[in-house]
Amino acid sequence: MVVFLIKNTSSPAENKDRQPIKTPPISPPVYPEEQDDCPYNEKSLSEISPDYSGMRADKEELEKWRLIPRDYIVKLWKKGYHWYDIIQLWEWKLTDWDIPDLKAEKRVGVMNCLAVTLNWWEEDKTEENLWVGLTHNVVVMAQKIVDGGPKVEVDRNQKHDLPMQPDSAKENLKYTKMIVDLVGEQNINLAQYEIFILNSLGADRFRKEREIAWGKIGGKSAGSALYLAVLSALTKKPISAQVVATGAIAEEAIKGKINGQEITLDKGTNLPIKGLREKMKASNEKGINHLVLSFYQSSPNLLLEYYEAKWRGAYTGSGQKIIEPEKWVLAEDYQNVVAPEIKAKMTTHFAENTHELGELFLTGKLS
């Protein structure tokens, strides 16, 4: 799950450029039985799950955990956050009333996101079952500052390179900031905002973190979901928890072909993604019934996209870089790839670019 937050820090010196803070709402109390029900404690965070499908806190994480008030932990657990999320949110000095409820039917700054990971559970792997889709939340929180924005913070998982993807952390931050800038085209003064982005593991993945690749997921296919989450956080308008988006946002003009005719796609184009079949299965299992997809992911507008030669982070036995050659790749067709019974349950919106994504959101079609 990915969360975007805009917040106020606690130190007067740090707050000198921020606008006056309104009196926060009073959070509901934490009752003794809720303290007992919350499964997060130092013992449970230190244990290895019997099937090794869970993640265990390291020494540094446990030291940070001991500093967090129990009431804060329980309140965020009730809102659907994983202990790993809670450590990050506490480090950002966000109060529990700053942070959206992931369990709500409509959520500000939160979008369902899709990814594909290796199918760890299948012993007899074939080409058909090698990969599996998953859903998670991207969460965005934002608060006004006097000037100097947009200030963008991402969670610590996004600051590390993904396996086999050199410089992916640096590219991810650049990509994230580009999407935030595109949101500014919706007549929003980004200089007045500080933004925090969390790729949430979610409380429902506690002791089952392998289902979400231990949080080590990422990629540009989350671009459209990120765009909508940022727009929601900045406008304070909610998005239904029944909506999911997947699409890569073009960082610059690129070339492609549709029905044999070469075209140029501008920066901000909502591009097709891979793993569509697996992602739609995951959406269906989650009960999601509204999908936002690229205009170019469905016939007769199927995009043939050009990819430049690129090093994928692998070497030959002699130490030479393995370069993936340039190629043209035809987008997976929503009409053919997705099972009819899943399409029948899904209301699908096709968006060509960030302007159309914004229109879907601002006209209330995603709320």
Image: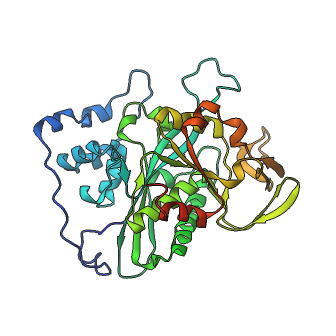
Q: Position of residue 198 (x, y in %)?
A: 42, 54
Taking 248 as reference, is 21 above or below it?
Answer: below
Q: Quadrant of the C terminus?
A: bottom left
Residue beneath the point at 69% across and 22% down: 126
Quadrant position of residue 45: top left
Q: Position of residue 185 (x, y in %)?
A: 55, 74
Residue beneath the point at 45% across and 67% down: 152
Left or right relative to 218: residue 56? left
Residue beneath the point at 35% across and 42% down: 82
Left or right relative to 324: residue 6? left
* Extreme residue toward the left, this view: 32
**Residue nearest the observer in this picture, 49 or 95:** 95
Left or right relative to 319: residue 26? left
Q: Position of residue 44 (x, y in %)?
A: 28, 32
Residue beneath the point at 83% across and 50% down: 328
Residue 146 visible (yes or no) = yes
Residue 95 visible (yes or no) = no
Quadrant position of residue 332: top right
**Residue nearest the observer in this picture, 45 or 135:** 135
